[in-house]
Image (tube, grey):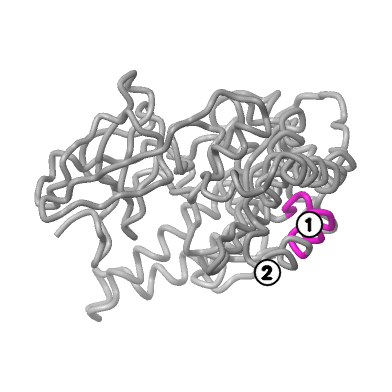
Amino acid sequence: MKDVLDYYKILGVSPDSDAESIKHAYRDLAKIWHPDYNKDAAATDMFQQISTAYDVLSDELSRLQYDILSLVYEQKNYPDIESMTAFQDDGDGVRIRVLNLFSVRSWFTGYKISQHHEISKESSAFGKTAKNAALNWLCGWWHPKAFLQNLKAIKNNLKHPLNESESKKVLLHNMIVYARDKQPAPSVKCGLQASLMFSGEDKALIDKFINLQNLKVSAPKAWKTTSLKAGQLIVPAMAAVAVMFSGADKYMNLSESELWNIFASKKEINYYQEVNFGQGESVDDVVVGKIVSVPVNKSDSSQLYHLTKDSQIMYGPSSDFDVIKTLPAQTTVRLTGYTPDNVWARIMIDNGEIGFVYFADIKQGIGKAIPFGSAITE
């Protein structure tokens, strides 16, 4: 059993210790480190650590939550349980998994290979994987070496269409969030799905949490990945044939979204973004135009906002775009623009990348402290 925040280590007990052993360990350490009796400079900090560890491990539910989240989180990204929000796909955070999407994008002078994970319901998973596969073949074969990389991407997507470790994380995360919010049915459904991915003591922890909900629901069905694997072969083949028979040269200068719209027979999206930094201009060709720009003055704190929940930052103002990255709640960002309907906000993140997030998911003001060297402030 993992002890990611070292709570058991701090108290000097093992993860399988009973409640009485934890209580005795705390009392013994408190006598040693209480600042009223120990004048060592480190006493106050040590006593706070001991007290925090005991507060979590002395309560059955909080200890169980800690043990379960330790299965899927590391110390660097361990969440604050009270501020956790559910991972969701189209408003449904129960029947979800995390897709593995390997992408290849190329041009005559080079190419780029990337991997990203995307939360999805089973009903929408095929469309997302098929779109990624089509774009690999529409945008990923212009460089000679990229063709071979496409084959590797197909192999990886075929072999691992779902990311099991990330799927475990979103299901256990949501199980605890729903239980905290007094929603036992979705909590149990998430837990039952997650339980199928574990064994031994880890599975026993999840089953114990499920039993605490005191609710019976029907057993979940396993996700079928056959269609996800088929999409890696069928869709790229159709896209390649379409390009060959319609003349490849006219597609060479199109953006990947324009290529996808042609392939999927969707309305064309025109790309253009201009961000004024006060000393020159920076142009990014991955974001839809018709954005109301906010001048970027890095000394202006009024345009600093923070995420109200864990949020996916998109390349464009639509959930159909690829995800740049997922940022945790309270991350501070800079507003650089917004769509006229105020649905999407264009933001800058610490590394200088610009993307889009739902306007409803940000709030004016600084959240977590801004890291040293961040691009969003001077």
- Give the residue type at disc 1: Ile
- Give the residue displayed 60% in from the left and 40% down from the top: 259
Q: Amino acid at mark 2?
A: Pro
Image side of residue 321 versus residue 153, left or right: left
Real-space CA distance between mark 2 and mark 1, rounded to the nearest whole angstrom: 17 Å
Segment tinted magenta in the rendering? 152-164
Tell me: residue 221, above or below residue 342.
below
Residue 82 visible in the picture:
no
Q: Quadrant of residue 272?
A: top left
State the residue at coordinates (49%, 44%): 81
As drawn, the label of residue 154 is 1
Q: Is residue 110 above or below residue 54?
A: below
Answer with left or right where residue 376 lies relative to residue 180: left
The secondary element bearing badge 1 is classed as helix
Q: Say if the magenta span includes residue 71.
A: no
Name the residue beneath numbered marker 2. 144
